[in-house]
Image (tube, helix red, strand yellow):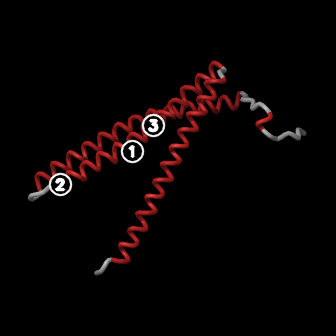
Amino acid sequence: MNENTNLLDNEIIIDATATGHLKETAMWSKILAITGFVFSVLLFAIGIIASVTLSRFSNTYSRGNSFGAETSGFLIVVIYSIMAIILFICSLFLLRFAIKMKTALINTDQESFQQALLNQKYYFRITGIVTLLACLFMLIAVIAGFITAMTASY
């Protein structure tokens, strides 16, 4: 039995099974990346459409000042644009991972393999940060809602 269990002291061997898994992972990553690109464009378009619709609605039905509707319309565009940009960047890293991994496996190229793993790391880093921020915002919203409900007078 080999007493040296530190993987950093030994080379990791990618056999046929691992290569098959990596090829399939690259294929699905490419599909998810393209889907992410499409959804990021749709998200941006929905933000603009919602903003324009809100602006037209406020101009049609408001009496006097429509400053609040214009501000909320701008806020919608900003929020949806930020979400679309984040999704686009995540999809870009995922697509780079898929392309580099496929190249690395076809050409047995160590540099492409390392670049693929770097892009995968960036993808997971950004996705993790965004997920943690979303959880934090949801927690803050639940706490704010709870406090508002407790202090509301009937």
Closer-to-camera residue (111/100): 111
Q: Which residue is at a point 29% across and 43% down the rendered structure image?
A: 46
Q: Which residue is at a point 77% across and 30% down the rendered structure image?
A: 11
Please tell me how crowded label 1 is: few (under 14), some (14-19), or many (20+) other residues with Cα within 10 Å: some
**Residue annotated with mark 3:** 89
Q: Residue lying at the far right in this picture: please name it.
A: 1
Q: Position of residue 37 (x, y in %)?
A: 41, 34
Residue type marked 1? Met
Q: Residue lying at the far top in this picture: please name it.
A: 107
Number of numbered discs present?
A: 3
Q: Secondary structure at mark 3?
A: helix
**Residue annotated with mark 1:** 83
Please tell me how crowded label 2 is: few (under 14), some (14-19), or many (20+) other residues with Cα within 10 Å: few
Q: Secondary structure at mark 1?
A: helix
Q: Can you tell which quarter of the image residue 113 is in?
A: top right
Q: Residue lying at the far left in this picture: please name it.
A: 64
Picture disc at residue 22: none
Q: Earlier in the sequence, mark 2 or mark 3?
A: 2
Residue type marked 3? Ile
Q: Earlier in the sequence, mark 1 or mark 3?
A: 1
The mark closer to the camera, 2 or 3, is: 2
Q: Earlier in the sequence, mark 1 or mark 2?
A: 2
147 relative to 53, above or below = below
Q: Position of residue 92 (x, y in %)?
A: 47, 33
Q: Which residue is at a point 51% across and 34% down the rendered structure image?
A: 94
**Residue annotated with mark 2:** 67
Please tell me how crowded label 3 is: few (under 14), some (14-19), or many (20+) other residues with Cα within 10 Å: some
Residue type marked 2? Phe
Q: Secondary structure at mark 2?
A: helix
Q: CA distance from mark 2 to mark 3?
A: 33 Å
